[in-house]
Image (cartoon, rainbow, N blue to C red):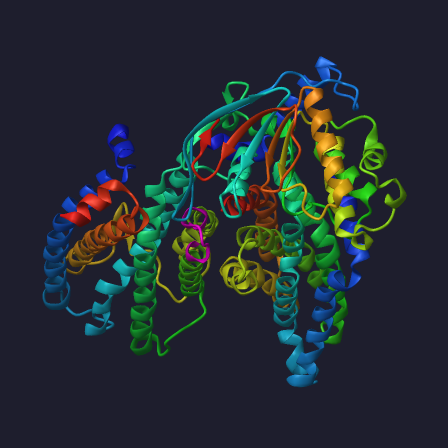
Amino acid sequence: MSGNWIRADWDVMEALEVVGRSQENEAPHAGAAGRHARVSLSLHDLELWRGDYCVCTNLTTAVHSGQLLHLRGSNGAGKTSLIRVLAGLALAEAGEVRLGGEPTTQSMTAYRAVISYVGHSNGIKRELTPVENLRVTARLALNPSTSGPESALERVGLAAHMNRYCGELSAGQRRRTALARLLVTNAPIWFLDEPLVSLDYEGAGLVEELIREHLARGGITVLATHQPIDLKGLEVVAVDLPQGRAQ
Amino acid sequence: MLKELLKRELLIAWRRPGEALTPVAFFLVTSMLFPLGLSPSAHLLRPLAPGIIWIVAFLAGMLGLQRLFRADYDDGTLEQLLLSPRPLTLIILVKAVGHWLVTGLPVVIGGGVVAAMLFVPPRYIVTVVAGLLLGTPVLTMLGTMVAALTVSLRQAAVLGPVLILPLVTPVLIFGAHSTTLAMQGQSPAQAFEALAAMFILSVSLLPAAAAVALRISHEG
Amino acid sequence: MFTWLHKLGSPPVLYRFAERAAPWCKWTAFALLAAGLVGGLILAPPDYQQGDGFRIIYIHVPSAIMSLFVFAYMAVASAVGLIWRLRMAHAVTAAAAPLGAAFTLLALITGSLWGKPMWGTFWVWDARLTSELILFFIYLGYMAVANAFPDQRTGDRAGAILALVGAIDVPIVHYSVQWWTTLHQGATLKLSGSNMPGSMLWPLLVMMVAFMFYFGWLLMIRLRAEILRREKRASWVMRLAAD
């Protein structure tokens, strides 16, 4: 029901309940070694317009643990619009996004607890250091990784720059900080919108590694990019926009 | 979590002091224009003082309005707040409190100084400060809601004050009236009750409205 | 009843309803306006204090009441649109807004014209006039916000929030004469009865109902235009245009 979308914002009790449930499970969410619980994300008859331009109609597809949903298309095809709908930021004209069979609108809080989003903008404050930024991220998540921001920053190659203000870092380094967010939130579902922007050759390799490791741990990645990326050996569900045919 | 978020807000303000201090600087400077522009006579300024203080406090609040969400919107941090499973209403309340501590509280204190400059008798300066203490949070909350509505618009800086003016007028009226009543020897209790009611209503209801408004702003 | 209301959420159904309801509202409004104006301007006796000048009440009071009613109506429609995600509820709000603003302006202007000969001033900053003026600005604010967004849907929903928050001004305007002593007289009409003589009262009541139907007629017209503008991509609109 549409009201839930609004209710989630002040439903403190619901948020506490979701925290309680996940803490009860004592599942191995901690750190890079643990596996994610089985998840599945499905789209049903999704119809999305941007003004007079139709991004997709009757788009139905699904991804499961260990798979990658690849949204392909040139600039302006609607990849960002679609990935924002999938992440629960925007609304589609028709259709549903389901998490494990249940529509995400039933409980946006539970959905947001299991997703992590890196969009066009980095989502980090320039006035803070990478460590400070990631500490906030950890606080905003329900079940952050126990290894902490420092190890996440080491993984993305920012060990030397952890305590400099993000405003002093290069664009590529800020992008890596944003990627470190994925490790800190410890979420099974990742949304990556043009993650390779600002990254050099090594950075692109880092993204590919992170995706592979994530899928190997049973996570799902939704990737929107028009740039070439090496996905050999991965299970990929591809969606070409704007036709919206799932393959 | 809430303490961490508040600390973050204050830390960011600390590292961008120019932006944070602009409203209170504006408040002090503009208040001083009145004796200079109108007349330095105590006889003229004293009855006008409550109105002047509240009007300039409101204008100072308008100046700082975009600070709430604009920067976060531009660098994507606002989006991350929307994506968090934590209740957005509480997050917004924390942001509003942080904003008030940085822009509103200095105005409350500055208001006492300005009241003295405008020849308000010392025993009524408490009334001025108390009124501002109740009223500036209401201004902040209304500003939060309007900023949330207009954050994605390019002409937000123009539209914001237009939208907020009709909503803020009662606060201005009762705020100034409370001091005027006191200076006339009557009890300001009713005006303070009205301010208190507005305070309670705005702090309890507007964060939720702002949360919905933020999500709506991001939908497009 | 609810199924009928739910069906009205569909654009073509609402369009046809507006099309059919418009003539009914129009003729009822004109008939009542004629009756009310005749009764008020000609038949009612002159007031012993104000002479013939009081007759502006037959425009002023209904306008003022409509200005409040339309905003309350917009607030309800906004809530419905937000909670049940009905696009047509937002269409109704958008269609009603300029009408409500016009009624508010009319009330303010007729009040001014009345005030000058009666109390010697065009304007006074008393509670009721000030809060009515604020209401006018809130109407303008709604129209500004709803049209400021490139995406129609986002603009609708943002405007809906503003309409809900601004709705607090409606009871303030209404009860301002009770809460503060103002230039305005106290309530002339109460549910228990009135202290106005019958010959003056009935044209006023007739005019109030007339304005309601007048608003209904204009709303139906504007609503059809709004629906067409918003649904221009839909197949039923294409078929309509082809005819």
Q: Residue at x 33, y 72 (%)?
A: C112
List x then y, in percent, for residue C222: 25, 54
Residue A227 vs residue B53, the one in the foreground: A227
List x then y, in percent, for residue B194: 57, 53
Whether C147 is among the magenta residues is yes
Q: Residue at x 69, y 56 (%)?
A: B133
Q: Is residue A142 visible?
A: no
Whether A129 is among the magenta residues is no
Direction from residue C229 to residue B18 in the image, left or right:
right
Direction from residue A224 to residue A158 in the image, left or right:
right
Q: Residue at x 48, y 25 (%)?
A: A61
Residue sitting at the far right = A160
Q: Residue at x 73, y 62 (%)?
A: B19
Q: Taking B138 as reference, is C86 above or below it? A: above
List x then y, in percent, for residue B33: 68, 80
Q: Taking A154 as reference, is C93 above or below it? A: below
The N terminus of chain C - image quarter: top left
Q: Is residue A183 visible?
A: yes
Q: Main secondary structure of the magenta part?
A: helix
Residues drawn in magenta: C146-155
Q: Taking A195 as reference, is B40 above or below it? A: below
